[in-house]
Image (spheres, helix red, strand yellow):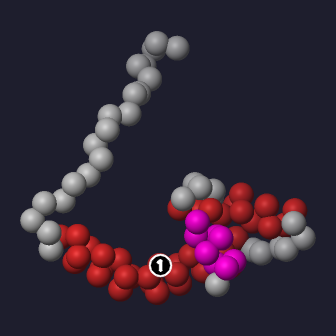
Amino acid sequence: AGLLAQVLVAKYADHQPLYRQEGIFARAGVPIARSTLAAWVGAAGVALAPLAAALKTSVLAHRIVHADETPIAMLKPGAG
């Protein structure tokens, strides 16, 4: 469970693609194939689908939904 949590957090929170995680695990002496990591991510997505659906239902049950729409500065094309 801990390893699966690590893979998911690294992928979705830390934006580490599976090929990079594969390399990190290999350097640590734990070779895990990218296809295995992908299968774990897919299975976790299926297993967590009911939780996501319940969260969506809960959020949409409120009369008002707040969101952070803080603008993010973008580089102007051609400005260097």
Indicate the position of residue 17 as horizontal and vertical percent values: 62, 58
Residue 35 shows in this picture? no
How many marks overall? Answer: 1
User: What span is in magenta?
Assistant: 2-9
Residue in the picture at 37% in, 82% down: 51
Is 80 rendered above or below residue 36? Answer: above
Indicate the position of residue 78 as horizontal and vertical percent values: 45, 14
Q: Is residue 37 magenta?
A: no
**Residue denoted by label 1:** 45
Q: Is residue 67 left or right of residue 17?
A: left
Residue in the picture at 79% in, 61% down: 24
Is 21 rendered above or below residue 32? Answer: above
Q: Is residue 72 left or right of residue 58?
A: right
Between 23 and 13, the one nearer to me in the picture: 13
Q: Quadrant of residue 14?
A: bottom right
Indicate the position of residue 23 as horizontal and vertical percent values: 79, 61
